[in-house]
């Protein structure tokens, strides 16, 4: 534990990074940033607008994959090695995440090859290659920072960008070609291997060896998922401005101006992303040492500094920003002074939120981090309703409001941790239901539109399979005991024998009275009433698609305890007691839930009820998103019934 005490922020220690490579990280980050801009400028000038267009699409996909997926992997590696240097450095699920991201990027590139890459299939392999190469890069840099080799971290970051620029320069000088130019993105990150990041020894580490402290593997998959969700939400605020402006109906000139202004002013965040590697180890050590109150103090100091810097950046950008943008991109891109001020101030708030968020990462509290950023996205969407002089200012103001909400929310979440509360009252009673309902409606409408062809095919198949309507309207018990008609695709004949359910319900009651092991499932094993088509629909959960309409109507949610018929609800009330049963009904029922991803219908009634109550106690936006992803995974793997 002495090692952790040396790392932890004991007063001024966090602010004194004495000759341990911190300067190298800063210098390396600056070099990497300059080289990255030089790479893009050189490509744009030599290849021209037409030739550089597919490269720009390739770089956008790369940037999103790196920030949203690969940087969280790096953070988890850093935290893992700070907590326990004797563990293998690759976190649980990281390899699968990188491989999935590479494959997903390749599929996206293949589907959009004509629109994004002018039909050139070479970019498809490059997308997969750059995600895989930078996945290795992220894990390798995580090893360097996690083992306090900060000098190597900074040098590797700068060297990778310089190698990429050098390879691109050779390509542009000998045979200018977009695919070959983009291939430099795959070659550059491999230079990190020159620093032997995966060796176990820690050279020039002034803090000595690291003891085996805790086993954190059990939490890493949730931590990684929460970090990726938080990164996706934060990048939606940073990158979504131009897209939203276009959706609001602004002209091409306004869209371009907003794009270049956001692009130029968010450049300082590149340095911030790399400085996270230096900040996270001491914060993790402080969290492991139980110095939560001290971490909150540091969080408040960072937030105050971010607000001060935001005000200074806004003032400076209002004065110099329009001229700088015009100088770099051309006079036609000159933004309004107010637009420049808002974007610059918002970026400083984003930087503060990035660093305050690392305290939550250090504590392994990615759930709160993800929840806060998701709420910030909702606040930003609501802020867009406020009228402004033009669409560009409207989006910029919403951006500042969203980043400010994220920074404030992260501080509130830290305060809740110190006082021992699992949730603040305002979040549980106000913000979470609002955000959940907003997400339910938007996601359900989108899914219904996307699933429309499947709905038509399934409806026709059900009607042809047996006489009767395609949809089944069945009364279920919803929130607070209210009854509603749940929609499903019919999987039984209309004249199915009701005695089968009556007998099964009697068996459940007898088993509940008997107690002990061997409790039956809530679903009927080998139900003779289900048609052959119905079994296939249930296997893939396609019969539940109409539930989305119940979600839109507000009778259900995407995630929650599954709604039951009145007889099953009464049985659970007798088994659990009235108070526990009321707790289960205190939230909207869901299309899917924690019990469904833990075994679908292959778990006993008492275990299913326990999981429902666990969800009610721990519900959050990040848990909801995790359950939705796990639902897709469960269905695709055909686990349970």
Image (cartoon, grey):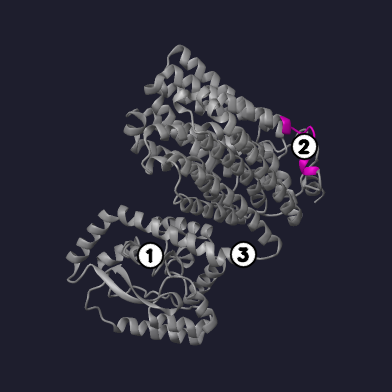
Residue 254 visible? The answer is yes
Q: Is residue 561 above or below residue 127?
A: below
Q: Quadrant of residue 546?
A: bottom left
Q: Residues within 10 Å of mark 3 (few under 14, many from 20)?
A: some
Q: Secondary structure beneath disc 1? A: helix
Between marks 2 and 3 in the image, the one whose residue lies nearer the viewer:
3
Residue at 71 percent of width and 44 percent of height: 281
Residue at 44 percent of width and 25 percent of height: 332
Q: Residues within 10 Å of mark 2 (few under 14, many from 20)?
A: few
476 in the magenta segment = no
Q: Nearer the viewer, residue 260 or 231?
A: 260
Mark toward the start of the polypeptide (2 vs 3): 2
- Residue stretch rendered in magenta on the structure: 13-23
Q: Quadrant of residue 568?
A: bottom left
Q: What label sits on residue 17 in the rendered view? A: 2
Whole-number angstrom distance, CA of label 2 to CA of label 1: 52 Å
Q: x and y percent of residue 564 in the render? A: 40, 76
14 in the magenta segment = yes
Q: x and y percent of residue 107 in the render? A: 38, 40
Q: Which residue is mark 3?
A: 424
Whole-number angstrom distance, CA of label 2 to CA of label 3: 35 Å
């Amino acid at each position: 534990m002495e090692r952790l005490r040396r790392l932890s922020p004991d007063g001024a220690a966090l602010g004194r990074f004495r000759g341990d490579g911190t300067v190298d990280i800063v210098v390396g980050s600056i070099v990497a940033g300059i080289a990255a801009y030089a790479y893009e400028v050189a490509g744009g000038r030599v290849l021209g607008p037409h030739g550089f267009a597919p490269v720009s699409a390739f770089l956008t996909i790369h940037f999103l994959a790196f920030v949203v997926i690969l940087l969280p992997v790096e953070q988890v590696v850093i935290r893992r090695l700070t907590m326990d240097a004797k563990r293998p450095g690759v976190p649980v699920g990281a390899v699968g995440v990188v491989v999935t991201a590479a494959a997903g990027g390749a599929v996206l590139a293949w589907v959009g090859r004509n629109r994004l890459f002018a039909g050139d299939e070479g970019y498809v392999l490059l997308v997969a290659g750059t995600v895989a190469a930078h996945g290795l890069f992220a894990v390798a840099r995580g090893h360097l920072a996690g083992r306090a080799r900060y000098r190597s971290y900074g040098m590797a970051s700068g060297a990778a960008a310089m190698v990429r620029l050098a390879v691109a320069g050779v390509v542009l000088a000998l045979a200018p070609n977009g695919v070959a130019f983009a291939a430099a993105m795959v070659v550059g990150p491999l230079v990190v291997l020159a620093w032997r990041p995966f060796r176990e020894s820690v050279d020039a580490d002034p803090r000595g060896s690291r003891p085996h402290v805790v086993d954190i593997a059990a939490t890493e998959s949730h931590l990684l998922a929460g970090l990726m969700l938080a990164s996706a939400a934060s990048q939606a605020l940073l990158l979504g401005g131009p897209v939203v402006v276009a959706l609001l109906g602004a002209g091409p000139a306004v869209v371009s101006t907003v794009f270049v202004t956001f692009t130029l002013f968010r450049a300082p965040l590149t340095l911030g992303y790399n400085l996270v590697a230096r900040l996270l180890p001491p914060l993790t050590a402080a969290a492991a040492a139980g110095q939560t109150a001290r971490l909150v103090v540091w969080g408040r100091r960072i937030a105050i500094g971010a607000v001060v810097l935001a005000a200074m950046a806004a003032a400076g950008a209002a004065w110099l920003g329009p001229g700088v943008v015009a100088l770099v991109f051309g006079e036609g891109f000159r933004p309004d002074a107010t637009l420049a001020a808002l974007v610059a101030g918002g970026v400083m708030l984003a930087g503060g939120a990035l660093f305050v968020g690392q305290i939550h990462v250090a504590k392994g509290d990615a759930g709160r981090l993800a929840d806060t950023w998701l709420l910030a996205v909702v606040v930003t969407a609501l802020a867009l309703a406020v009228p402004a002089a033009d669409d560009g200012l409207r989006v910029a103001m919403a951006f500042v409001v969203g980043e400010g909400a994220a920074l404030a929310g992260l501080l509130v979440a830290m305060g809740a941790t110190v006082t021992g509360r699992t949730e603040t009252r305002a979040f549980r009673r106000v913000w979470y239901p609002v955000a959940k309902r907003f997400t339910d409606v938007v996601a359900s409408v989108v899914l219904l539109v996307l699933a429309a062809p499947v709905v038509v095919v399934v409806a026709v198949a059900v009607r042809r399979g047996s006489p009767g309507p395609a949809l089944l309207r069945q009364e279920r018990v919803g929130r607070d005991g209210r009854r509603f008609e749940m929609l499903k695709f019919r999987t039984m004949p209309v004249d199915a024998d009701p005695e089968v359910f009556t007998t099964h319900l009697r068996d459940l009651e007898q088993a509940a009275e008997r107690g002990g092991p061997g409790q039956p499932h809530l679903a009927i094993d080998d139900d003779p009433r289900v048609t052959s088509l119905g079994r296939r629909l249930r296997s893939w959960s396609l019969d539940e698609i109409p539930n989305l309409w119940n979600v839109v109507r507000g009778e259900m949610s995407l995630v929650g305890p599954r709604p039951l018929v009145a007889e099953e609800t009464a049985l659970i009330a007798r088994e659990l007691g009235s108070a526990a049963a009321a707790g289960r009904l205190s939230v909207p029922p869901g299309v899917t839930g924690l019990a469904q991803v833990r075994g679908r219908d292959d778990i006993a009634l008492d275990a299913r009820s326990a999981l429902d109550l666990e969800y009610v106690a721990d519900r959050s936006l990040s848990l909801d998103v995790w359950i939705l992803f796990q639902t897709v995974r469960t269905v695709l793997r055909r686990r349970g019934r």
